[in-house]
Amino acid sequence: MTETAVFAALMGAMLLLGIGAARWRRPQDIHNLEEWGVGGRAFGNWTTWFLLGGSMYSAYTFVAVPALTYGVGAMGFFAVPFATITTPLSFIFTTRAWSVAHRHGYVTPSEFTAARFGSRGLGGLVAVTGIVATMPYIAVQLSSLRAVLREVGMPGEWPLLAAVAVVSLCTFRSGLRAPALLSIAKDVLLGWVVVAALLVVAMSGGWADTFRKAGEHFAATPSKTDGLLLGGSSGQAAYISLVVGSALSIFAYPHALTTMLAAKDRATVQRNAAALPIYCAVLGLMAMLGFFALAQGVTPVGHDLNTVMPHLFHRLFPPWSAGIALAAFGIAALIPAAVMSIAAANAFTRSIYRAFLRPAATPAEEARVSRWTSLVVKLGAVGCILLLDPAFSVDLQLIGGVIILQTIPAGFIGLVTNWFHRLALIAGLAAGLGVGVALLYDIPQLGPGGTVVKAHFGGSMTTIDGIPLYAGIVALLVNLFVAVFGTLVLRLLRVRPGRDGTRPDDYDADADDPMVKRLEALLDGLPGSPAGVHAAPRGSRYPR
């Protein structure tokens, strides 16, 4: 009872904090996309740091990754090197993305793509791809939340739907300010979780005993793919493909850029990118807790591996401490779900609704459409849980990664060069998505002893010539081949490329850029422009 009471009290306090975030730092008008969707582009170092950690290091880190190491061993550690690789990539690419978005008033990657290659159609396709890819990633968070709720005695789907409804109310009212404020409180709770976990491990035999018992467990299983070490060259190939694919995909998601666009200047973006390895260290610790759960004989509740970490804390911690940990896991699931749904909603509003349906949409109308779209995205994530339901919830994120990777040539590489032809990029994106979805469809979900539990969409690892590889990498290679070959052919045929709506100096613009007014500190109030000071001039259009 104590555990449940502490959990309920902390979750209730957090959600009330999220609802009240609409008045945080007194924004004059939150009813426009500049304020609702990217927090007025005025978050400082600490707010950006906590928001970035809250959205990128989520229940995926604290529940799904330990569940994977618990189930398969060393392969689950792919999340640690890929998170490390993203640090230099983020430092270079997100800084350029922040600058060009600051100069032109973009709030989504798809807006940049449309302007960079002179194609509303390409921008719309990138937006749709981002929205579809985000839904299974949100589903990872909701699956973890469902496991936490099950541990505190709330089984079934209705507690999950109730939690989704409440967080939807928070984001509907407060926009990006809600997860930003909650992220600060969440990291305080997770700090306690990390310290408490280290103490429990030390008092339960230490890491040496943990690895010994986990090794004995994997040695006794019938599977040849699990263990404390990767299984031969095939296991290493699968591991490397997961690391590379995940590292490329993580900052291609719309929500990753949203957190950075909320920063007030380039220096804030750079400082936060440089500090990301701190979170990587915590990720490594949480991954090892999967082994610790094995060593302690923890068994999942109802065969749901997502319950391993919640059940570990329930068994080994005092009730009041377990309640704090479970509340931290629950908030760690809700914050990224909120940020992801906001980012996906922004992409729909700017690159589909305003670009094709209502070019003259007012700022208030944009904000209203994004609010309602964010609700639809969360419902789509619930649908992903019910329809896909793979053995490991990490596979939901990896399935989303297969899809979002196909935006790399247009978005990620587009930050460096506009060499690609817009028509070739569209063809490459379509080819990559087709190959990726076909590969995912053919991947079965295997149970104990190699029996087929589900024939399709059972994971994200495909096999090429007997070598297991991440399906997203295979699809991306096809995408790049089509985009490069198509560009060469179109240039040979002298087909006119789209007009680049950006300039070289856009990618180095800072907050004191003379072409864009700098936002004043939120504490002092914002200018009264209903569209935000970074918004594009009224009547502007995407290039055709």
Image: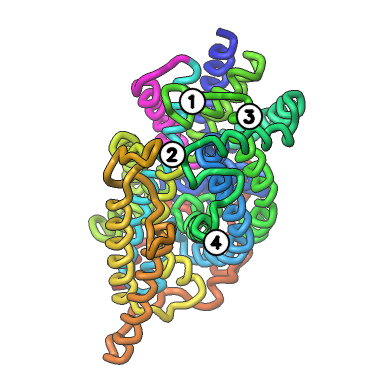
Residue 281 percent across, percent down from the top left: 68, 45
Q: Are marks 1 and 4 in contact (CB under 8 Å)?
A: no
Which quadrant would the N terminus be assigned to in this image?
top right
Which residue bears the numbered disc 3? 295
Q: Earlier in the sequence, mark 2 or mark 4?
A: 4
- The quadrant of the rendering that contains the C terminus is bottom left
Mark in the foreground, 2 or 4? 2
Tell me if I can see residue 367 in this picture: no
Q: In terms of sequence position, does the residue under pointer 1 or pointer 2 come before the other?
A: 1
Please say whether residue 164 is one of the residues in the magenta stretch.
yes
Mark nearer the N terminus (1 vs 3): 3
Q: Nearer the viewer, residue 374 or 435?
A: 435
Rate crowding at label 3 as few (under 14), some (14 to 19) or many (20 or more) other CA atoms within 10 Å: many
Q: Residue at 67% of width from left, 44% of height from top?
A: 46
The amino acid type, in three-letter code, at marker 1 is Pro
Question: Coloured how?
Answer: rainbow
Question: What residue does disc 4 label?
Answer: 98
- When the figure is inspected, residue 12 is found, relative to residue 283, above or below; the finding is above
Which label is found at residue 520?
none
Q: In this rendering, which labeled residue sits more in front, label 1 or label 3?
A: 3
On the image, numbered disc 1 is attached to which residue?
A: 300
Foreground mark, 3 or 4, reads 3
The CA distance from mark 1 to mark 4 is 42 Å
Q: Position of residue 386 (x, y in %)?
A: 30, 34
Q: Which residue is mark 2?
A: 393
Where disc 2 sits, the SS reads loop
Q: Position of residue 450 (x, y in %)?
A: 37, 41
Residue 419 on the magenta span: no
